[in-house]
Image (tube, helix red, strand yellow):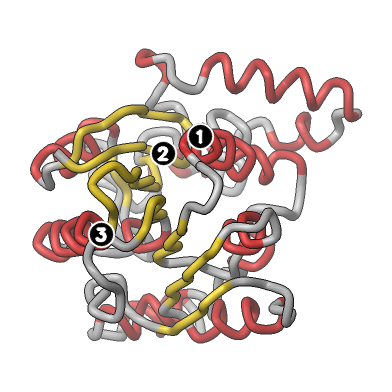
Amino acid sequence: MDFEQLAKIENESERVNRTYDIFNENSRLNHSKAARVEFLTTVRYIERYLKEGDRILDIGAGAGEYSFYFARKGYDVSALELADANIAAFRKKLTPEDRIDLVQGNALDLSRYADKSFDIVLLFGPLYHLKQNSDKQRCIREAKRVCKDDGKIFFAFIANDLVFLTELEYNAHYFSNGDYDKETFKLNDFPFVFHTVEDARKLLADGGVTVLHEVASDGASELMAARINEMNDEDYAQYLRYHFYLCEKPELLGMTNHLLFVGEKK
């Protein structure tokens, strides 16, 4: 599978499925210190709201990075994932001790789960892929439906604006030949879907979500990856404190490759 072949797949679910024949989600969040920043930031916010005995639903669970982390801390985790490659990677890591109910399915249909049955709902992968606003809103409605009234929903987006700078690492001519609108600086939504901070705010407001936190979940970590990966443990720990200090500053929210929004039902 390559990008040219991927672009020819008309069915969106199948195109998303095959995307992970190209991209290795199994190592994306754990292959380096820089890559780990997004995961550590996201976990930090989830743990603010977790209570003993809480049930977690991980929608678009990828290869299980968050599911395993919380299951191995004793939480009851249900995980739903669409892509064959991610399901295979996830199952390869499962042990009999892991309290994870893993199923292959689509985030647009959570009918297997009862209303108001989860305390924490993670909606990460799906909003990286859904192009149509109607599908995004359907996905949000389903996440809200299965979340308890006092529960919290965590939404992840791939941010639009910093990609231009991180792409320069791979393509010095990105500003002249990159795949984006040269007037609006909106990236082409292939193979992923990109959101500005305002896009994400509007989507969640229209979906009836009250936003509690807006977070630049990895900030400049990909842009500065070479330096971050050279850090010793002491420097890295201090860098993380610096990142946590910055990551909710409104003036810097767009300067990240990934956004995390924490919300609850209105």
- Tell me if residue 254 comes above or below residue 106 in the rendering: above
- The tag on residue 260 is 2
**What is the x, y in percent for residue 143?**
26, 59
Q: Could one spot residue 165 in this view of the protein?
A: no
Please give left or right for residue 165 compared with residue 4 in the image: right
Viewport quadrant of the C terminus? top left
Q: Are marks 2 and 1 in contact (CB under 8 Å)?
A: yes
Q: Which residue is under mark 3?
A: 116
**What is the x, y in percent for residue 81?**
44, 75
- The tag on residue 45 is 1
Looking at the rendering, which quadrant does residue 132 occupy?
bottom left
Q: Residue at x 55, y 77 (%)?
A: 86
Check disc 1 and give the amino acid type.
Tyr
- For the residues labelled 3 and 2, the Cα–Cα distance comes to 22 Å
Q: Secondary structure at mark 2?
A: strand
Of residues 226 and 266, the one drawn nearer to the viewer in this rendering: 266
Pointer 3 or 1: first along the chain? 1
Check disc 2 and give the amino acid type.
Leu
**What is the x, y in percent for residue 32?**
76, 47
Tell us which disc is closer to us: 3 or 2: 3
User: 10 Å neighbourhood of mark 1: few (<14), some, or many (≥20)?
Assistant: some
Q: Residue at x 58, y 62 (%)?
A: 67
Check disc 3 and give the amino acid type.
Lys
